[in-house]
Amino acid sequence: MSPLLPGLEQALVERHHTVRLHELPDPDRFLRDHGADVVAAVASARFGVGNALMDALPRLGAIVHFGVGHETTDVVRARARGIDVGNTPDVLTDCVADLAVGALIDVMRRMSAADRYVRAGNWSAAPFPLAARVSGKRVGVLGLGRIGRAVARRLEGFDMEVAYCSRTPVPGVPYRRPPTARALAAACDALVVTVAGGTGTEGPVSAAVLDALGPEGHLVNVARGSVVDESALVAAVETGRIAGAALDVFADEPNVPRALLDSDRVVLLPHIAGVTRETREAMGDLVLRNVERFMTEGVLLTPVPGSAH
Ligand code: 8YV
């Protein structure tokens, strides 16, 4: 349905009767003529399968996302049509958590800003300004799923005091759970956003949450741009109402607001948390295994919650 890793596309072509919809000169015509022959769809988590496309594929039984996010496909609607939806959980957890920790250290210690400082030849003129200590600080994790837990575990290694916020308490974790995102932000020095995107989660990091984080507070977002009110974030960065932000995701990728591009207090990354050779390969492999299982047994290997038969 959308471009994938070349190796994954190749493997799909070799093993199944595969059509690359995005490469066809007239995809609408293909859908009209052959839409009823398509039984499985593979899509980047970035694009998913929209409702119109879903409707053009009356025999569709499975949608497999390359990525853990699945907010780009209406899973409830798919289920109502008898379509299972799968994703690629677990295999990317470590890399996303690694990057979240790296981004947190970068923004608090101002490593990217210091790198720019050296390159600009400013070091000889004056020492780099003082940054914020990381070890021993209080960190809030917004959304303690697989990735949030992996981030929290890593940050324990920095003697950080971890608290979290999630819809329901997570059993078996030793962390405090303030009742709201705002209370969590008020009680921490850094807020790491790892909550799933999608309807219902849009905007939990509002202007009020950012104000609660405060002028010494740092924000890290490795989840989805939609879970942070981006205009409120831009305003908070511009006015110094938060100390800084490290962002791997944005509201309208690949477009980044000018004010963020111009700010030295933000670390800006092009949605690369899961983008390592090892993780991409493992994600591709899991997509293939999901398709394989569906084509042979009619079920997915890793259906998204609430999607399995
Ligand atoms: C992907 C992601 O890069 O897994 C996810 O949901 O955000 C990323 O790993 C992207 O969604 C698909 O290319």
Image (cartoon, rainbow, N blue to C red):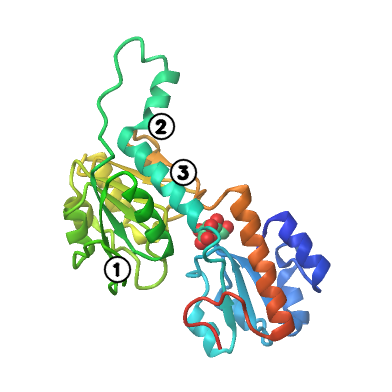
Q: Where is residue 136 in the image (x, y as percent from the top left)?
A: 24, 43
Viewer-proximal residue among 167 and 250: 167
Q: Quadrant of residue 87?
A: bottom right
Which residue is tagged 3? Answer: 269
Q: Is residue 287 left or right of residue 47?
A: right
Q: Position of residue 112 (x, y in %)?
A: 41, 32
Q: Please name the amino acid that badge 2 sits on.
A: Ser
User: How many residues crowd mark 1 within 10 Å: few (<14), some (14–19), many (20+)?
Assistant: some
Q: Where is residue 216 in the image (x, y as percent from the top left)?
A: 19, 41
Q: What residue lies at 31% left-to-right and 63% top-to-bottom?
A: 203
Which residue is tagged 1? Answer: 166
Q: Position of residue 281 (x, y in %)?
A: 65, 55
Q: Distance from label 1 to label 2 (Cα)? A: 31 Å
Viewer-proximal residue among 24 and 10: 10
User: What secondary structure is marked by label 2?
Assistant: helix
User: What secondary structure is marked by label 3?
Assistant: loop
Which residue is tagged 2? Answer: 112
**Labels 1 and 2: the sequence-earlier one:** 2
Q: Distance from label 2 to label 3 (Cα)? A: 11 Å
Q: What residue lies at 75% left-to-right and 74% top-to-bottom?
A: 29
User: How many residues crowd mark 2 within 10 Å: few (<14), some (14–19), many (20+)?
Assistant: some
User: How many residues crowd mark 3 within 10 Å: few (<14), some (14–19), many (20+)?
Assistant: some
Seen in the picture, residue 33 relative to 1 is either above or below; the reply is below
Seen in the picture, residue 308 relative to 115 is either above or below; the reply is below
Q: Distance from label 1 to label 3 (Cα)? A: 25 Å
Judged by depth in the image, the label closer to the viewer, 1 or 3, is 1
Q: Is residue 171 left or right of residue 250?
A: left
